[in-house]
Image: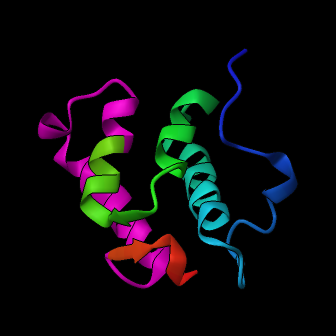
Amino acid sequence: MVATCFDWRYFEAANSLGDAPFPNKLDRLLDKLCLDLGFCLPYSKCRILLERDSWEAEAFAREVVRLEGLNPDYEPKFVRMIARRFIKRFGTSFVRAHEY
């Protein structure tokens, strides 16, 4: 069994993040992508995403798709779906960790 970003302690709270810091919000977004879309990245790949101090929605989406082993150029539907969820989660298409 591969460890993923998902942590069941956050299952019920995944939609209500309040004032959680940026990495926590990003981690919970990854949890939701796993639950809702099946993009369940192993922990080692999640860390790549969580260690960045800023993300743009489409770049984040493309990286998630790439880390899942798919080519984002051939999966525009997934890129759009993930980018929309990123914007919905953060309220903007670009976020910096120090803003959270």
The quarter of the picture where the N terminus appears is top right
Residues drawn in magenta: 64-93
Where is residue 22 drawn, in percent x and y?
59, 69
Q: Residue at x 36, y 63 (%)?
A: 55
Q: Is residue 28 left or right of residue 36?
A: right
Classify residue 73 by image quadrant: top left
Vertical side of 1 occupied by 36: above or below: below
How many numbered discs sit on the rendered protein? 0
Where is the C terminus found, in terms of image quarters?
bottom right
Residue 20 position, x and y percent, is: 71, 75
The residue at the far right in this view is 9
Q: Residue at x 51, y 83 (%)?
A: 99
Left or right of 60, for residue 14: right
Q: How is the image coloured?
A: rainbow
Q: Is residue 88 above or below residue 1?
A: below
Q: Quadrant of residue 13?
A: bottom right
Would you place residue 33 above or below residue 25 in this image?
A: above
Q: Which of the pair 72/48 is nearer the observer?
A: 48
Residue 43's x, y, as percent? 63, 32
Task: Judge whether residue 29 can be spotted in this image.
Answer: yes
Which residue is at the front of the view, 34 or 47?
A: 47
Q: Position of residue 61 (x, y in %)?
A: 33, 52
Residue 69 inside the magenta-drawn segment: yes
Asked if residue 39 shows in the view, the reply is: no
Residue 82 highlighted magenta (yes or no): yes
